[in-house]
Image (cartoon, grey):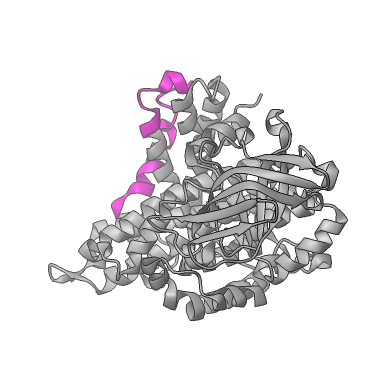
């Protein structure tokens, strides 16, 4: 614990922040009608929740982060007090704590530790999870980091040795029960969401596009199969996914329907013992290399109750374009979408034209009709946790690069790290990362306990927005070099931008998930 960090300050500040957010959530009548205020309240609820989780991790970082949250909240509240239903003096009682946490001298002391360790505070991992972290950090350093910049720069396919190596380490079966070939049983760390977070962070620290997202797709499809599949389907699909013999992609989003999943139009029409798929999906990451496509399609016109999930089996294709045809004229084809970042897996537009799928490949069989929306939403909770971990991994990498550059770069005769402004930036980066990391583990516990939809959405929204700021500030510290592709920070900056868009767009999560749950009577 650093000099000047009084645990009571941060705790009192967090309690005051909770009071303001709670009062606002009770006051705002409609997330749909009062969107501007509801968005701010939802966003602040996530930040305050993260501040609360950081209290028992590190007193310095907890105070720094809580003070920054208070400053952010004050800015959002000013001029809108009546809309929030909160008195403008609500935080006056903790003003001294805010001042202590924002004192530049205090930030400099915090930065001293970060500059020495390249870490955003202690991890508080069990011995088992420390071993998991060490194993995947070593793998990432040996296999992923050496090729990450090249894959991004040339938009290459992910090398097979990365995929094969992760399969050998059991990455694709983290959430699959042991009886189906996965690692989820007993108290083994690989069976816990915490292990998933640790693995995802370490892979994303090396490269978001080349590794950090590889286990998300199997996580989504496996969750849907475990919760909704028949016993025959579990035994047919899950061992192949867990072993990495069959790679996975998800086909939910459509050109006209992104987060508005309940309105999707891709149809599945019954024809004897087959279903015929017609429609277009977009942003289907890894749909070329994947053998299994998890396709959400409309089997009935009845809104979200008319959606069902299919597993479409296909060959794996390298590159950016592929096409398949069936006897009788059915076809499915994919074309990769060029993107700013997040390269390697490639995101595809996939077109189904009379493509026939065996009735046995409807998840849940006849009992799965109309359950697709619910199964997909359940699977997204874990995916959002993983996306938060991906954001933390990207931020951790950016912090390390910023620290390294600041320590060795001379500016006006002194190392960049010696300047107060640099240290303030470094300290704030560390506090954000620590808060997001602590909240991600808390959200994982909530999901394990049986719900956790609110916490998963909150930490996803918070961490992904934080990643944009952290990578931007890290790039800024690099000056002109940060804009050069030969420096890894430029890759982190463009990769971070996608995080607030996929797995639940920032605004949709805030208004449709977080605000609605906060405002329930």
- Whether residue 224 is visible to the viewer of this picture, yes or no, is yes
145 w.r.t. 220: above or below: below
Position of 419 compared to 357: left or right? left
The answer to which of 59 and 216 lies nearer the viewer is: 216
Q: Is residue 334 magenta?
A: no
On-image quarter of the C terminus:
top right
Q: Which residue is located at x 62 percent, y 46 percent?
A: 353
Task: Say which of 138 and 449 sits in front.
Answer: 138
**Residue found 61% across the figure and 49% down from its top:** 251
Of all residues shown, which one is farthest toward the front? 328
Q: Is residue 82 left or right of residue 453?
A: left
Q: Does residue 295 lie above or below 286 as drawn? A: above
Residue 78: x %, y % from top left: 36, 27
Name the residue at 83% across, 44% down. Answer: 272
Locate residue 373 relative to residue 28 in the image: left or right: right
Q: Position of residue 335 (x, y in %)?
A: 49, 55
On the question of residue 5 being in view, the answer is no
How far from the left and from the top, in percent, is residue 186? 80, 65
Compared to residue 92, the image places residue 395 above or below, namely: below
Residue 460 in the image: state x and y as whole percent. Answer: 54, 48
Which residue extends farthest left? Answer: 412
Residue 418 location, quadrant: bottom left
**The magenta segment:** 75-104
Considering the whole magenta stretch, tell me its main secondary structure.
Answer: helix
Kindly give the residue lying farthest to the bottom in the view shown.
Answer: 142
Q: Magenta includes 91?
A: yes
């Amino acid at each position: 614990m650093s000099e000047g960090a009084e645990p009571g300050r941060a705790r009192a500040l967090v309690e005051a922040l909770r009071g303001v957010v709670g009062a606002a959530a009770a006051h705002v009548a409609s997330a749909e009608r009062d969107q501007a205020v509801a968005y701010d309240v939802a966003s602040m609820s996530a930040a305050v929740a993260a501040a609360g989780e950081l209290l028992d991790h590190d007193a310095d970082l907890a105070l720094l982060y809580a003070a920054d949250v208070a400053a952010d909240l004050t800015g959002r509240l000013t001029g809108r007090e009546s809309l929030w239903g909160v008195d403008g003096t609500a935080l006056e009682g903790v003003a001294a704590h805010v001042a202590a946490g924002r004192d530049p001298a205090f930030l400099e002391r915090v930065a001293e530790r970060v500059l020495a360790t390249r870490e955003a505070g202690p991890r508080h991992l069990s011995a088992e999870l420390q071993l998991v972290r060490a194993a995947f950090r070593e793998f990432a350093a040996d296999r992923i980091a050496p090729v990450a910049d090249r894959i991004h720069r040339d938009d290459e396919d992910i090398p097979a040795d990365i995929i094969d190596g992760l399969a050998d380490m059991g990455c694709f079966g983290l959430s699959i029960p042991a009886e189906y070939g996965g690692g989820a049983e007993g108290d083994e760390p690989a069976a816990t969401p915490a292990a998933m977070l640790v693995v995802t962070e370490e892979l994303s620290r090396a490269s978001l596009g080349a590794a950090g997202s590889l286990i998300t797709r199997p996580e989504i499809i496996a969750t849907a199969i475990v919760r909704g599949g028949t016993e025959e389907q579990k035994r047919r699909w899950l061992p192949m996914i867990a072993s990495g013999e069959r790679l996975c992609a998800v086909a939910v989003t459509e050109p006209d329907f992104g987060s508005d999943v309940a309105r999707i139009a891709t149809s599945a029409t019954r024809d004897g013992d087959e279903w015929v798929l017609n429609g277009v999906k977009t942003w289907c990451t890894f749909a070329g290399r994947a053998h299994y496509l998890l396709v959400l399609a409309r089997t009935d016109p009845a809104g979200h109750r008319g959606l069902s999930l299919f597993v479409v089996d296909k060959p794996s294709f390298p590159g950016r374009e592929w096409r398949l045809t069936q006897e009788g004229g059915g076809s499915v084809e994919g074309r990769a979408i060029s993107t700013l970042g997040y390269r390697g897996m490639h995101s595809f537009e996939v077109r189904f034209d009379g493509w026939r799928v065996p009735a046995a490949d409807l998840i849940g069989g006849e009992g799965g009709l109309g359950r697709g929306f619910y199964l997909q939403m359940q699977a997204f909770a874990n995916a959002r946790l993983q996306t938060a971990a991906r954001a933390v991994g990207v931020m951790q990498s950016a912090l390390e690069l910023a620290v390294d550059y600041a320590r060795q770069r001379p500016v006006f005769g002194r190392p960049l790290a010696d300047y107060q402004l640099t240290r303030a930036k470094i300290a704030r980066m560390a506090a954000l990362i620590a808060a997001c990391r602590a909240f991600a583990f808390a959200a994982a516990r909530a999901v394990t306990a049986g719900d956790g939809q609110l916490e998963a959405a909150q930490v996803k929204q918070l961490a992904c927005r934080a990643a944009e700021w952290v990578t931007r500030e890290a790039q800024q510290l690099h000056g002109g070099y940060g804009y050069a592709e030969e420096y890894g920070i430029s890759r982190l900056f463009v990769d971070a931008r996608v995080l607030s868009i996929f797995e639940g767009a920032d605004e949709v999560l805030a208004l449709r998930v977080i605000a609605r749950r906060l405002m329930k009577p």
